[in-house]
Image (cartoon, rainbow, N blue to C red):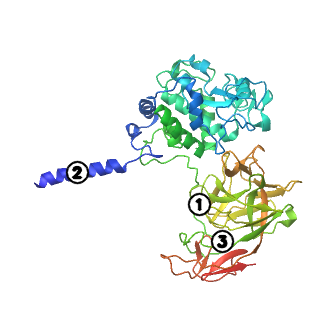
Amino acid sequence: MFKLKQVLLLVALSVALAVYAQGPNGTGTYYKGADGFSGKTLKTKLYHIVGKLHTTDYNGLWQTYKTTDKRPDGKLWDMYSKVTSYEIGSSSQGHPSGREGDGYNREHSVPKSWFNKQTPMHNDAFHVVPSDTYVNSVRGNLPYGENNGEMFKGQGNFAKKGKCTTAGYTGTVFEPADEYKGDFARIYFYMATAYEAAIANWKSPVMSGDEYKPYVKWQMDMLLRWAKEDPVSQKEILRNEAVYKVQGNRNPYVDYPGLEEYVWGNKVNDKFSYDHYVSPNPANPTDIGGVYPGHNGENPTEPVNPENSTDKYVFKKITKSSELQPETQYIIVCEQANTALSKADGTKTSSFYAPANVEINNSTITTAVDGNNTPHQITISGTDGAYALYDVAGKVYLISKTKKNVLEGVTNKSASWTITFSNDGNAEIKSNLSDNRSIFYNTQMARFATYTTTTQKPVQLYKFVKVVTGITNVENNTHKNTSGVYTLYGQKISNKAETSHLPKGVYVVNGKKVLVK
């Protein structure tokens, strides 16, 4: 009887563990067959998983795009052009074009001539994406690569064609916009995996003829770099799920950001775990400590009660460097989108910042602040050419120190920004640590991040003026003791009710709101 109980217990535990072990994005045990492998073997294991697909016929892609490539505004998501706004399924579909913006068609990101138009590659929605017809024709069957755009530049310099400037190749290449380079890199990783048994026979200047490493070195190095610089986006996650519902397979390089490093990169000797995956290229920087300014070295608490305040704060637009006042709070706004920079994406340290809707009247914004769906106040400190941008609610400093299209938060102070103003009042908030990157708003991705191009929407700075409503207390059922100093977001920054060390702004001190001037 005792042994029987042991057996039953082990069975129960095994079932429980099987239920508990789940992959990301609702994938369950889909990738379990690749668990514990790395490098070349991992790629082959993934091939046996994602290589099982059932594509539609080629004309069926038009219907597929209605669910896989719909922007938040309902229009077609075009990764080749910044200016298109096609109604999906309208007369623009398949329309021949003599200029950018006339119509859209089906673009084989891996050109069909490379694999001789064979199926299922020819109809695979993961790499056959909708695109502007004209820009598609400009690309033809050219490989992706970096160039100066001397042969073609799309509107807003969104896509370019020219002689390759990446070491290792001097031929003509086509370069997509920065914000989609990671998307296309992960598509290429998918193709290398899903078609492992066929890809060695594909013909192109960038194909190596090798089953394991099918792209020549310069191309592979570039794709790995693109994947790091442009992390997995919510767009890709949603598209991955939508294509899965049509084809029955997934792109593992979207489900597991940085998986390419386990297959070809610097993690090839590390085993992949489908249910306890550790990304080698986290979008969020490592928390390396540091203290909140003026909190006397005490550890900050978790939020006590976010967004419990009904107060409204008034912010006025500034348009000159002389109007910048250090240790003053601002909000970063995109007037063209009626949005302001809000919380980091998911955690206090993230790769970009989400927007919050605002109403702008006569260059004035009146709004609640520092909540999950309201603008976050940014305390600007430092001197000209070396400003620090501090997210009061998130308790992090904004930073951009890589070649990625990101805006990150770190806990150690970083005076790493230069702020100037254009003649039309836009603020150029430029990182001193990255290659010519400034804060912009990306309307298609609905995010604030840093970019090198001006195809994104400019931002403006609005300075805190006053509070226009009453005072509310910070309180909830689990944290009755409100002694000390809290941010408006409800995070405790000091056990002592002292304000002399605090930067200018509004705080909750012993349960009452205090304005520090």
Answer with left or right where residue 425 lies relative to residue 48.
right
Query: Which image quarter: residue 150?
Result: top right
Please tell me whether mark 2 sits on a helix, a strand or a loop.
Answer: helix
Answer with left or right where residue 161 lies relative to residue 484.
right
Residue 190: x percent and y percent?
A: 53, 32
Disc with the residue nearer the chain's start (1 vs 3): 3
- Identify residue type, mark 2: Leu
Residue 206: x percent and y percent?
A: 62, 24
Mark 2, other Cα within 10 Å: few <14 / some 14–19 / many ≥20: few
User: How many angstroms separate mark 1 from mark 3 (CA)?
Assistant: 16 Å
| Residue picked out by circle 2 | 10
| Residue picked out by circle 1 | 348
Q: Would you say the residues marked 2 and 3 are in contact, meaning their CB atoms lie under 8 Å apart? A: no
Mark 1, other Cα within 10 Å: few <14 / some 14–19 / many ≥20: many
User: How many angstroms separate mark 2 from mark 1 (CA)?
Assistant: 40 Å
Answer with left or right where residue 461 lies relative to residue 259.
right
Disc with the residue nearer the chain's start (2 vs 3): 2
| Residue picked out by circle 3 | 293
Instruction: Point out the frontmost of discs 2 and 3.
Output: 2
Instruction: Please determine whether, in this image, residue 510 is positioned above or below residue 9.
Output: below
